Amino acid sequence: MPLRLEIKKKLSARSDRVKSVEIHPTEPWVLAALYNGNVFIWDYESGSLVKSFEVSDDNLPVRCAKWIPRKQWFVACSDDLKVRCYNYNTMEKVAEFEAHTDYIRYLEVHPSLPHVLSCSDDTTIKLWDWEKDWNCTKVFEGHAHYVMMVRFNPKDANTFASASLDRTVKVWGLGASDPHFSLDGHDKGINCVDYYPGGDKPYLLSGSDDRTVKVWDYQTKACVQTLEGHTNNVVAVCFHPRLPVLLSGAEDGTVRLFNSATYRAETTLNYGLERVWTLSATQSTSEVAIGFDEGTIVVKLGSDEPVASLDTHTSKVVWSQGGTISQASLKGLDPEEAQDGEKIQVAAREMGSTEVYPQSLRHNCNGRFVVVIGDGEYIIYTSQALRNKAFGTALDFVWSSVGTGDYAIRESISRVKTFRNFKEHRTLKPAVASAEGICGGALLGVRGPDCVLFFDWDDAALIRQIDVAVKEVYWNEAGDHLALVAEDAYYVLRYDRDLVVAALSANAVPADGVEGAFELLHQIEDKVGTAHWVGDCFLYTANGSRLNYYVGGQVMTLAHLAAPAYLLGYLPKEDRVFLGDKQGGFLSYQVNQAVLRYQTAIVRRDFAAANALLAEGRVPAAEYGAVARFLESQGFKEEALQVTPDPDQKFDLSIELGRADLALELLEAAGDADQGTTEYATKWKRLGDLALGKGDLALAQRCALASDDLSGLLLLCTSAGDLQGLAALAEKARALGRANVAFLALFLQGRVEECLDLLVEGKRHAEAAFLARTYLPSHVPRLVALWKEAVAPQSEKAAAALACPAEFPNLFEDFDVALQVEQLFLQNREQRFPASTWPEAKGQLDLDLIAFLKGQGGGGGGGGTAPPAEETAPPAPAAAEVNAPPPGDGAAEEAQRPAEEQRAAEAAAAAAAAEAAAAAEAAAAEQAVAAAAATQAAEAQRLAEEQAAKQAAAEAERLAAEQRAAQEAAAAEAERLAAEQRAAQEAAAAAEAQRLAAEQRAAQEAAAAAEAQRLAEEQAAAAEAARL
């Protein structure tokens, strides 16, 4: 049966001809040496080019490049006969030296010593020591033609093998310059060689121009197997270090995979990139890199998931590596060694090898048996002694969740068989287009292209079809919950066993299954790698980088993984979940069983059991925070408030529950380190919002003051009519530099003088002057003087244009009346009107005092419109009303009439004089306005002329810039044409040099072939003569 290895393309990078590739042992990188003189480092996970190096100055071919990971170097050889070494992190050239007298074909790095081997067309192999300044410490001679490749023996690094066009493979030792022995058998030149990486076979692989691949036993020097199939020269071969396959690449453009145990041809890869030149595989990954004429391909063979199974009954893990089955116990681990995420050192016991190459291992439900699946076959062994119990052919195998020997196999895409106690029980033919897989558990699942069908193990009756394209199905131990894992999500369902059993007992199962057998609980968008149920908690690895668990619709991260790992299972006695990595190692993370049981009880609404776990102290205090967060996610906020030890979470919960008293206690108990922080202020503001919603204005004001929410505090003080609060707010705002809030607080108190001082402190002289003109006109001269001083440094003309009422009283109408109103305002501003007297006091508050005083003859400066309402002040009794004479009899009035007429005449004369003065003032004002208009016109003319001059200068500068740009563009175009001409000349010269070199090599090869033919004919003639 075939190996059925999944082959997935990881990287496809187009480039010039690739002569050498090598995969980095720890990073997801592949090193590619190109025929155009460059070396590329590709990231095969992301598909991006990490770095590129121009190795050859003349673009001569780089035939080989190899990593030296312990030094962060790589070495490369090119056709200028030099070897170069680079630091691939800093891109610094470490060394450069001439190594051979002819083309260098290959480089090989010693696995532990500071040595590098090079082989060349000059028929020699040289050993270089980088600790001795890259000196050549030994030369190996013995080949009669080009030496194409050298490889160290992984089992004995003091020996190496070489492949040559003289049709031999020679094995050498580092201690001698002559070969130990030669392997002959190919009909044409040998291009490549590789050692078997395992310790069980002394094998060596070679590929030749005779289109064959040979497997040699280098101990008996015999050819074990000859592999055929290629239609052109075989130029690359390798044993895969992890999988039982060997690969060969040829100039026919294909890579062929063979089973290294049976030598059966498994598959052929052809990516349409012309000839294959090189192959590379590494022990640390299952990837294979291939170099073609037109680029680099990296493919992944099989899966990185370890072939291992954990028996939760005995705490023993069984795994396979290289076909060998081993076992180890994970019971009673040392707490110091079993740290979260650290590799576990286990005492492995080798159990033996299997007849098939294991691709999967699985224990049955009670751990007594383990099945090995691979090569299209399955073998069931006893888990302790590895004795054969049953076997057969199958594409898939799954155990039932009950019964020691109950299982199912998928024979084909249309046939599934079930077994009871290791004997065939029933045959299923699922009603799907193609049965792509089967799933074990409480029910037998059959995966189709876009659905999964569940069958009863005993009766093979269809229980239900669920239309979801799933990859895997996971059941919990109780068999009442399952997870359907799709590509980018998983679905958690509840299984109603009682309903299904009742339907089966009554023989009343419809053709489309039992409706209501499954209930969808949650759909979680997450990519599941491997998974395992612990009670009602679903543990799984997500995207290979996180260990998560689901419970009650919530997903929590248990740990972040340093490298991809695969879930094996959970051991309750150890309170740890165990994982395996692709290198075959094991690691673990602690999962507190009491916490999982508590969360499970909450999900099941078994509050008595959950409370008992807390009361008995089974849940560690360190886990209370996680428990509280889980309770909060489930909606049990009051319980979470009682459990959580985290002050921040407790505060958040108290706010959500409306517990303002508890939130206040928490804030008052905060330490000095928390006070003064932004988070601390935010908490006070949140508490203030809660208090305001509850109508507790006193607490809201305290919170606003503590959180420096001055705007909110202003609103609260004004709403409550709190003068003391406003006074405190003004002081605090002034201290914090919040000028606008301080201004409003002072103004609402009637402290206009302090408002003026605040504006002056903020250099806002213009606003201060206007405010004084409205409310305190006696301060205007002082403020205008300050305004002029501030403006003068910027513009003397603007400062001179500012008019002061003391100097130009004719420009300020009713200014003298405003001064009288100011006195009334100062006398009465302490008088307060309760809000309840608003209807009666409204008329007095709206009184226009300037108009009133003018109407009573208390103002000078003539008539005119009344000033704005803000220039009014609280009303005071009018003087005319206070000094009016008491009424008298008619005789007295008659006696006083002449006097009154006299006074009326005098008043009329005074009014006429006043009108004349007003007319004079009006004329003066008109003259001042005319002068100001003339000044403004002159200034506007000057500004227009300056603007025109600036525009002309800008246009000239633009034209000059355009001219310069045109000249620079012309120069750039000329430079580009010159560069293209130089490049064309260089390319033509390089092509000519390459053609001449190729002709020279062809002539040398033809001469060598003719000489070899002549020698062969002479030998044949001599042999014939000797025979005769």
Image (cartoon, rainbow, N blue to C red):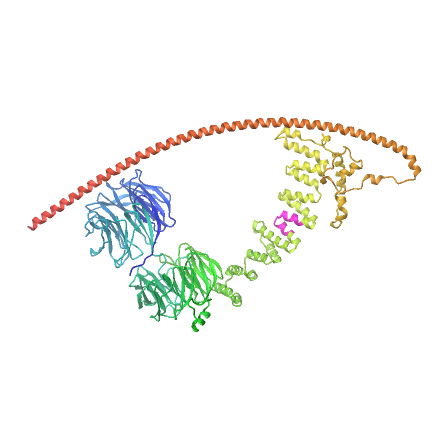
Q: Considering only vertical position in the picture, is 580 above or below 722?
A: below
- Residue 131 visible in image: no
Residue at the front extreme of this rendering: 511
- Residue lying furthest right in this view? 891
- Magenta-highlighted residues: 701-716
Q: How many marks?
A: 0
Q: Who is closer to the viewer here, 924 or 430? A: 430
In the rendered image, residue 708 lying in the magenta stretch gets the answer yes
Q: Position of residue 861 (x, y in %)?
A: 76, 32
Q: Is residue 84 left or right of residue 509?
A: left
Q: Is residue 931 magenta?
A: no
Q: Where does the N terminus fall, quadrant-wise?
A: bottom left
Rendered view: 795 above or below 1002: above
Q: Position of residue 401 (x, y in %)?
A: 40, 68
The vertical placement of 224 against 86, above or below, is below
Residue drawn at 19 percent across, 46 percent down: 144
Q: Main secondary structure of the magenta part?
A: helix
Q: Nearer the viewer, residue 438 or 15?
A: 438
**Is residue 927 or residue 886 the one in the foreground?**
927
Quick one: which residue is furthest to the bottom in this view? Answer: 506
**Residue 59 location in percent, x, y?**
30, 39
At which x and y percent is residue 895? Answer: 92, 35
Does residue 148 appear to the left or right of 336 in the view shown?
left
Is there any visible trace of residue 843 in the rendered image?
Answer: yes
Residue 365 sits in which quadrant? bottom left
Taking depth in this image into account, of 388 and 269 the one nearest to the observer is 269
Q: Is residue 818 above or below residue 167?
A: above
Locate residue 429: give its quadrant.
bottom left
